[in-house]
């Protein structure tokens, strides 16, 4: 029992580091007709212009995510319908120019914080940057189409994938969302 105070003191001394590791950066849309909240580790660096894609880059990992919001007229779009209509050959061909040797992997319906989204992932065999993994998600909400694409070096999957999964789980098509998963 004499060790309990020492263990408590050690635990408390580690709290600020743990809290720092779990802080989040939050970006919201500057345009009221294209609402979103993008939540990511606060070490990531954002760039982009109002009305254009928002890019976040991780300074310590080869990881980048790009959020694009565009007006759409297809108000009947659903993630389930998009998954059922997904053409693996067309998707792979579409990504092959950017990522040579791209092959489509798993595809499913996932959940953003606000609503369901189509998700698929794939990998490239390489190119000058080496093998890359892509995780693509998309949804339609209130007249807007949202795509969130995250790319990382396949060899860094153990470190990058949990970050990508947290970014996707926290994304919202609403303006004032709060983190539900710590990135």
Image (cartoon, grey):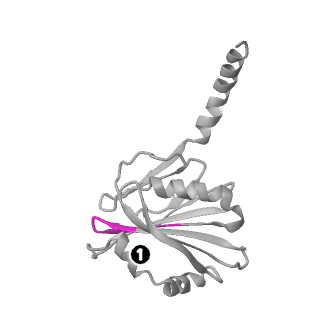
Image quadrant holding the N terminus, namely top right
Residue 183 as seen in the image, left or right of residue 147 = right
Q: Residue at x 65, y 83 (%)?
A: 101
How far across and down, in percent of the image, does residue 169 sit?
Answer: 47, 55
How far across and down, in percent of the image, does residue 181 sit?
Answer: 49, 47
Q: Secondary structure at mark 1?
A: helix
Q: In the displayed structure, would residue 93 be above or below residue 79?
A: below
How far across and down, in percent of the image, does residue 2 sit?
Answer: 72, 12
Residue 97 as seen in the image, left or right of residue 170 = right
Q: In the displayed structure, would residue 120 be above or below residue 37?
A: below
Q: Residue at x 62, y 56 (%)?
A: 58
In magenta, the rendered stretch is: 139-149
Q: Residue at x 65, y 72 (%)?
A: 132
14 and 71: which is toward the camera: 14
Residue 8 as seen in the image, left or right of residue 35 = right
Q: Tell me the residue that label 1 is attached to.
A: 83
Which image quarter: residue 5?
Answer: top right
């Amino acid at each position: 029992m004499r060790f309990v105070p020492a263990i408590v003191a050690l635990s408390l001394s580690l709290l600020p580091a743990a809290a720092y590791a779990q802080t989040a950066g939050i970006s919201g849309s500057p345009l009221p007709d294209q609402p979103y909240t993008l939540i990511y580790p606060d070490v990531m660096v954002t760039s982009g212009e109002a009305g254009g894609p928002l890019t976040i880059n991780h300074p310590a990992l080869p990881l980048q995510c790009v959020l694009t919001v565009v007006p759409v007229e297809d108000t009947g779009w659903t993630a389930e319908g998009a998954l059922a209509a997904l053409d693996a050959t067309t998707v792979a061909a579409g990504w092959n120019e950017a990522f040579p040797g791209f092959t489509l992997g798993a595809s499913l319906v996932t959940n953003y914080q606000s609503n369901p989204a189509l998700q698929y992932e794939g990998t490239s065999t390489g190119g000058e940057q080496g093998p890359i993994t892509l995780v693509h998600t998309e949804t339609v909400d209130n007249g807007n189409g949202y795509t969130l694409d995250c790319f990382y070096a396949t060899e860094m999957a153990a470190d990058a994938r949990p970050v990508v999964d947290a970014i996707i789980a926290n994304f919202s098509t609403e303006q004032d969302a709060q983190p539900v998963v710590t990135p």
